[in-house]
Amino acid sequence: MPEGPELHLASRFVNRVCSGRVFTGKVVKSPVHKSDEVPFHAQSYIITAASRGKEMQLILSEIENPPKSKGRGKKPKNLANLKTMKILFRFGMSGKFQFTTVSEVHKHSHLQFFTNDDPAMVLSHVDVRRFGRWEVDAGWSKVRGPDPMFEYQLFRSNVVKNIKSSAFDRPICEVLLNQKYFNGIGNYLRAEILYRLSIAPFEKARNVLEGLNEDPPEVKPKVKGQEVKVKVEDPKVDILHLCHTVPLEVVNLGGGGYDPEGKSADYSKFNAWLQCYYQPDMNNLVDHNKRTIWFKGPVGPMAPKESKSRSPVKKRKKKETASANDEESPKKKAKAEEKAKVNTENKKKSPRKRPAKTQVSTPSRKSSKKTSVNAKKVENTPRQAKTQIPDAHEVKGYATRSKVTVNGMMKSKTPKKKTAKHR
């Protein structure tokens, strides 16, 4: 699920691809999506983006006298902004933005903005699972707190001032997902933050957070353009400070956990950065909200009773081993095909025996239904004597090829002559 760093990377991506471009025409919405239409009608407009925690805004600004040269270039200057519209996005489980040609638009694209280029390009909001939503003419949500990455001071103050709230009576791992105080922190970030400080995930949140100051601790700042990690051994580093620095580390990866181009994502940097989340040597447990927390060491006193751990790591190992042994897979496929051929040949041979069994079925059962204990019918219709032979216990006599026994007396008959006369 996209978290604070992924939303920020998405906003940077939109600002990069939309810089110097002019958009035109109607904003096209997919009919299958439940969010509202975007009633923005402008002959020419520009698009910018901003993020805050787990929310992102697209700002559509109408312009006059667009530049004659189409395509990318410098941002238009001295253009009067006529009207603007803000669209607030929440990405859900799989939301993202793509910038493609018209022919390459993703089939799960639910909102499309077209440029006036020749050929036209499309900025589209893609959401395969359709859990994401957008709101038209909406500002930042009031129920979400400040961004820990870019509103650090406000973020700390919001947590420290509300430490006596009943929300902090819950386990720390669950409070970290409360967007009212930890806007942008998600499942993998909470695991990494708690692991670096060796905090039990089901320790009471107030016990972990009480005593912290509103002012941030004085630690070595990050150097711009470099991946400088704060040492956990520093006593000045607290959990609120890691809520600020750990997400920035993901941003400094340069999009390792986000796929803005719509191609197969390269998660190698992101997977190498992870220390706790989804690692095979870590423990995991399902919390009260049915979310899986990854940790190492004691679980804490507020762990849910009879809670079970999930084991998706084993499934991942199977996939990894299968991908690592791709060279051997054709041999396995060949063997499977040979076995399938042998099975099909055996099946073709074996079913031939079934019709023979049905032909050998006793005719007495069929004939007993058709010839109901009546010897006169057998005498009057000699043809039936050959095909429909009644049982001996049902009638007093039965027919044979050359003789008929009636009441114990043997009498010879010539069926051929009778059949001839009958004919």
Image (cartoon, helix red, strand yellow):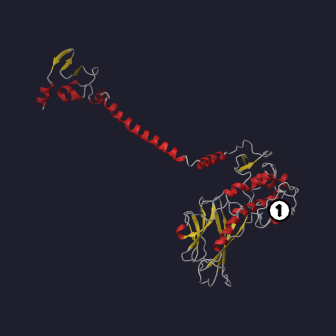
Across and down, in percent, residue 31 comes to: 55, 65
Q: Quadrant of the N terminus?
A: bottom right
Viewer-nearest residue: 22 or 145? 22
Viewer-nearest residue: 226 or 102? 226
Residue 401, visible in the rendered structure:
yes
Q: Which residue is labeled 1 in the image?
A: 156
Viewer-nearest residue: 45 or 422? 45
Q: Amino acid under label 1?
A: Arg
Across and down, in percent, residue 408 comes to: 21, 14
Q: Residue shown at 60%/79% (left/top)?
A: 42
Q: For residue 396, what is the image quadrant?
A: top left
Across and down, in percent, residue 234 comes to: 86, 56
Q: Residues within 10 Å of mark 1 (few under 14, many from 20)?
A: many
Viewer-nearest residue: 34 or 270? 270
Residue 136, visible in the rendered structure:
no
Across and down, in percent, residue 44 comes to: 60, 80
- For label 1, the SS is helix
- Classify residue 224 as left or right of residue 119: right
Q: Quadrant of the C terminus?
A: top left
Vertical side of 411 occupied by 278: above or below: below
- Classify residue 207 as left or right of residue 333: right
